[in-house]
Image: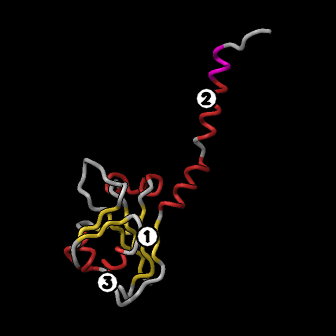
Amino acid sequence: MTALPQGIIFLILLTIVLAGCGPANAAYSSAHNAQTVRTINRVMDLMSHLQQLPGLTVSGQGQNATVVVRGAQTLNTGIEPLFVLNGQQISGSYASLYTMVSMHDVASIDVLSNPGDIGMYGARGANGVIVIRTKQ
């Protein structure tokens, strides 16, 4: 019996490892990391809605609240996530978003923390992304 050359063994192992890292795993984790609020209570303010979402830590009250997406912090930037309102990135903090959003107009709120989901936002999305869509 002849032994397999080392090159062939290496290729077989490489194929097995790459097969385990396929897109099926990325789709699974992406689907389970996005948190969404689709039922909007018009009486509650934005902070109260964000407090209901798993994966978010909201401290403080009203406009002065601090919002943190758990598991998405980096060392290079602050702790606040990127806020996106109807596809437009909001420059500033939660306080500026709080004054811009009327809960009567909100259709959905999504929290993105998976690297696959926040990758399109670049470095600004490194601390997570909160996407708010209003009725149009």
Numbered range of the magenta stretch: 6-10
In this figure, which residue is indicated by the disc labeled 1?
110
Give the CA separation, mark 3 to mark 1.
16 Å
Q: CB of mark 3 within 8 Å of CB of mark 2?
A: no
In the image, residue 41 sits, relative to residue 82, either above or below, namely below
- The residue at 42%/76% (across/down) is 133
Foreground of the two, 95 or 13: 13
Q: From the viewer's side, name the closer residue of 133 and 111.
A: 111
Task: Please name the residue that numbered disc 2 is placed on.
Answer: 14
Is 115 situated above or below 132? above
Which element type, helix, strand or loop, lies under badge 1? strand
Left-right relation of 27 to 130: right
Locate the N terminus and report the quarter of the image it occupies. Answer: top right
Based on the picture, tell me whether residue 8 belongs to the magenta stretch: yes
Q: Quadrant of the C terminus?
A: bottom left
Tell me: residue 13, above or below residue 127. Answer: above
Q: Give how far apart the Cα atoms at labels 3 and 2 are.
A: 52 Å
Q: Amino acid at mark 1?
A: Asp
Mark 2 is on which residue type?
Leu
Residue 75 position, x and y percent, is 26, 47
Name the spot of residue 58 as percent of width and height, x first: 29, 70
Q: Which residue is mark 3?
A: 45
Instruction: Name which of mark 3 and mark 2 comes first in the sequence.
Output: 2
